[in-house]
């Protein structure tokens, strides 16, 4: 057979010869359809097949281009929406509901546009193709649908959440308004629960990292929201009862003075009795610690474990019942003093210190006092913890100043002078630092705050968090704890069959020689030189743990007491500061298992905010 090329063209003779030699099937391919009808069908079939394939290729290309374009638009819509979420949150906290609702409207418009795209023709067709990685399209659709639902059923209701209803005005809180907030939270909670279920059912196999990471981020958002909404729902559920909607309630508000350190904060010198009924609040009495006289025997039966660490004085002197680092137990002890004085029982106890008061004053602004002073967020702590003792030598005058301050702040709050956002932020900060404690006789309220920092009672196990305690108690019989700062750090080290918690507690004095020389008697106390500050430090290890070691400034510490208290190892040592110096306690506790939640340090709140570093480490 002669090959045909541009350099070797075929002649007519050669063509005739090849036709004679070729099979019929081959000849048919070279004949025109008019001369050979058989040639028409095979040639037509090939072109139809090629055309169909071409259409499919072009169609898939167009479909792919459309899906990519839709995906880019979806991302753009969601990016715009996310940019408005913070604006909704900020506006709600600031009480600007018009701005919150405007931002919520933008968000819902953007998420709806994204939802329409992932439910459009191109996305739906592509999602049905049985090909690898198509799960990504279906997962993106789920994520967009969940986001759209959260926008409409969470952010829109949230944009109408009036936080000012939580703040007193005109002498109380509107309990009916609290009911409206509860209904809003219920709607939000239902939407968040639904989102968690839908995300749990989302396809997670064969996902590209971008889609997988996006789903994980959405998971985190929903889990975080659930963690916030649950407590909010619970609090709003019990708040009307706490405000006297179901009958009068009596509260004991105690002020602890950090200038004379105690485990829970300080010497509780002033007690204010609050009455609430149908949301209205009023002060009915102010009682001083000097109204309760010292005893030679404990006022009530005491926990032997607590007595072993702190001594019987926790039940013999009212300045010492807050040495026990368990607020419910401290309240129980003081309730015996209260009853012994013939006073009516209270339904719940609240504890604040002057630093927490300063946080509240950020919400009210500066307030005038009957003495002519002005108390503010800047001067509350130094005025109430130090300056008052220079000004008034008589303890009764000191207590009168404290009581007058408490009444002024209370009147400002119930009178509506506190801005909602800074008030809630200040109270939250006070809780986090252990400066705001609460104990109630109501079982629902007790369950609500059980084992939280607000309860003032360390957890009984390490499942949710691994709590250790570092508590300071003044041994000088003075108000010189004001000059001390306490910095604590802790580290959790996990092994195959256990864990160790190690760390330091640094107690620093800023008392100078000049200051020590001018201290009034009530500050310097009768037992030590003015330059010296003696502090009993009590360290608590994790629940179920044991003490491994404790040193002071690198040398073995002299242990004053050691044992179990509330299922935890506890050790008591003395730190003595001389003028402006510092001493470092190093400690180590061991735990026989490593099923431990994140590490937390609970410590005595001092006169100033100090370093507290535990970094949330866990063995999980």
Image: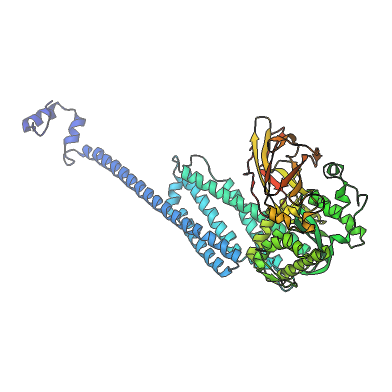
Residue 314 located left or right of residue 591: right
**Residue found 31% across the figure and 44% down from its top:** 52
Q: Is residue 20 visible?
A: yes
Q: Residue 128: horizontal and vertical position, in percent?
A: 46, 46
Residue 595 in which image quadrant = top right
| Residue 34 sits in quarter | top left
Residue 301 placement (x, y as % from top left): 90, 48
Rendered position, 353 above or below 2 = below
In the depicted structure, whether residue 390 falls above or below residue 327: below
Q: Pick the quarter of the image with the N terminus.
A: top left
Residue nearest the observer in this picture, 144 or 615: 615
Of the pair 458 and 216, the residue shown nearer to us: 458
Image quadrant for the C terminus?
top right
**Numbered-mark total:** 0
Give the residue displayed 50% in from the left and 45% down from the top.
213
Viewer-side residue, 288 vs 36 = 288
Q: On the picture, is 235 further left or further right than 148?
A: right
Q: Nearer the viewer, residue 430 or 296?
A: 296
Q: Position of residue 88 (x, y in %)?
A: 55, 62
């Amino acid at each position: 057979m002669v090959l045909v090329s541009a350099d070797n063209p075929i002649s007519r003779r050669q063509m005739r010869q090849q036709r004679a030699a070729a099979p019929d099937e081959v000849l048919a391919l070279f004949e025109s359809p008019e001369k050979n009808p058989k040639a028409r069908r095979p040639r037509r079939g090939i072109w139809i097949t090629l055309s169909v394939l071409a259409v499919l290729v072009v169609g898939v290309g167009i479909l792919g281009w459309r899906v990519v374009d839709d995906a880019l638009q979806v991302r753009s819509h969601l990016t715009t929406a996310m940019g408005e979420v913070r604006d909704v949150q900020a506006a709600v906290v600031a009480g600007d509901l018009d701005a919150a609702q405007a931002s919520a409207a933008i968000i819902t418009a953007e998420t709806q546009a994204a939802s329409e795209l992932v439910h459009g023709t191109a996305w739906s067709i592509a999602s049905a193709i049985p090909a690898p990685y198509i799960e990504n399209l279906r997962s993106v659709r789920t994520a967009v649908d969940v986001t759209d639902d959260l926008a409409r059923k969470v952010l829109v209701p949230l944009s109408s959440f009036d936080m000012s209803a939580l703040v007193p005005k005109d002498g109380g809180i509107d309990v009916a308004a609290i009911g409206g907030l509860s209904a809003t939270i219920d709607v939000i909670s239902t939407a968040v629960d639904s989102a968690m279920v839908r995300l749990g059912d989302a396809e997670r196999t064969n996902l590209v990292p971008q889609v997988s990471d996006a789903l994980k981020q959405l998971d985190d958002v929903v889990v975080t929201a659930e963690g916030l909404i649950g407590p909010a729902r619970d609090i709003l559920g019990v708040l009307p009862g706490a405000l006297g909607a179901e009958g009068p309630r009596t509260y004991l508000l105690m002020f602890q003075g950090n200038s004379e350190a105690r485990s829970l904060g300080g010497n509780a010198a002033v007690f204010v009795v609050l009455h609430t009924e149908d949301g209205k609040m009023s002060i009915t009495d102010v009682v001083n610690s000097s109204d309760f006289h010292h005893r030679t025997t404990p006022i009530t039966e005491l926990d032997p474990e607590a007595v072993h660490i702190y001594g019987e004085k926790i039940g013999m002197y009212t300045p010492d019942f807050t040495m026990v680092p368990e607020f419910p137990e401290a309240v129980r002890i003081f309730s015996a003093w209260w009853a012994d004085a013939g006073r009516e029982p209270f339904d719940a106890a609240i504890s604040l210190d002057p630093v927490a008061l300063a946080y509240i004053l950020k919400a009210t602004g500066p307030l005038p006092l009957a003495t002519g002073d002005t108390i503010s967020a800047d001067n509350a702590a130094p005025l109430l913890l130090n300056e008052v003792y220079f000004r008034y030598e008589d303890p009764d005058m000191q207590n009168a100043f404290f009581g007058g301050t408490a009444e002024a702040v209370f009147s400002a709050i119930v009178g509506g002078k506190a801005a909602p956002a800074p008030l809630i932020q200040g109270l939250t900060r006070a809780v986090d630092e252990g400066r705001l404690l609460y104990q109630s006789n109501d079982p629902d309220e007790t369950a609500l705050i059980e084992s939280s920092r607000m309860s003032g009672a360390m957890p009984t196990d390490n499942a949710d968090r691994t709590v250790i305690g570092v508590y300071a108690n003044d041994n000088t019989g003075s108000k010189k704890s004001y000059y001390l700062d306490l910095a604590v750090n802790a580290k959790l080290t996990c092994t195959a069959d256990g864990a160790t918690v190690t760390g330091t507690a640094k107690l620093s004095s800023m008392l100078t020689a000049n200051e020590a020389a001018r201290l009034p008697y009530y500050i310097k106390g009768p037992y030590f030189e003015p330059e010296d500050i003696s502090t009993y430090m009590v360290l608590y290890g994790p629940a179920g743990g044991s003490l491994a070691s404790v040193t002071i400034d690198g040398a073995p510490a002299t242990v004053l007491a050691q044992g179990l208290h509330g299922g935890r190892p506890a050790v008591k040592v003395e730190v003595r500061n001389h003028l402006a110096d510092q001493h470092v306690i190093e400690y180590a506790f061991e735990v026989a298992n490593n099923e431990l939640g994140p590490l937390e340090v609970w410590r005595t709140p001092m006169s100033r905010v100090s370093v507290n570093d535990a970094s949330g480490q866990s063995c999980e």
